[in-house]
Amino acid sequence: MSDDYCTIRDAVKPPKADGPPYADCVLCREPTEYPESYKGITLCPVCEWQEAQRTACSG
């Protein structure tokens, strides 16, 4: 059995930005690592980690 059976391997993440301006986190409004021009949901590293904790193996 693999240790990473709960991870989502096919999830598409936005490309990391080379520099400012950064997109705001959709949950806490803090700057993310993603470019402001990205269209879609962006989370800061803290919210991304917390969201992963909430959804990991919850089923």
Image: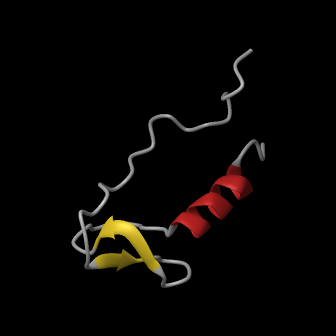
Q: Which residue is painted at 26% across and 67% down in the image? A: 38
Q: Residue at x 60, y 68 (%)?
A: 46
Count of labels shown? Answer: 0
Residue 58 located left or right of residue 20? right
Dividing the picture into quadrants, the one containing residue 15 is bottom left
Query: In x, y percent, where is residue 42?
Result: 42, 67
Taking 43 as reference, is 58 above or below it? above
Task: Decide if residue 11 is on the left or right side of residue 3.
Answer: left
- In the rendered image, residue 29, in percent from the top left (x then y), is placed at 48, 85
Where the N terminus falls, by quadrant?
top right
Q: Residue furthest front?
A: 19
Q: Which one is nearer the viewer's eye here, 40 or 44?
A: 44
Task: Note whether 38 is above or below 28 in the view shown.
Answer: above
- From the viewer's side, name the closer residue of 35 and 42: 35
Residue at 42% over, 71% down: 32
In the rendered view, would you say 15 is above or below 23?
above
Which of 18 and 50 lies nearest the eye of the viewer?
18
Q: Which x, y percent locates residue 54?
A: 72, 57
Quarter residue 51 falls in: bottom right
| Residue 27 falls left or right of residue 14 | right
Q: Residue at x 66, y 29 (%)?
A: 4
Q: Position of residue 53 (x, y in %)?
A: 71, 55
Going by the picture, which residue comes out furthest to the bottom?
Answer: 29
Q: Is residue 35 above or below residue 7?
A: below
- Residue 34 position by quadrant: bottom left
Quadrant into which the C terminus falls: top right
Q: Closer to the camera, 37 or 31? A: 31
Coloration mode = secondary structure
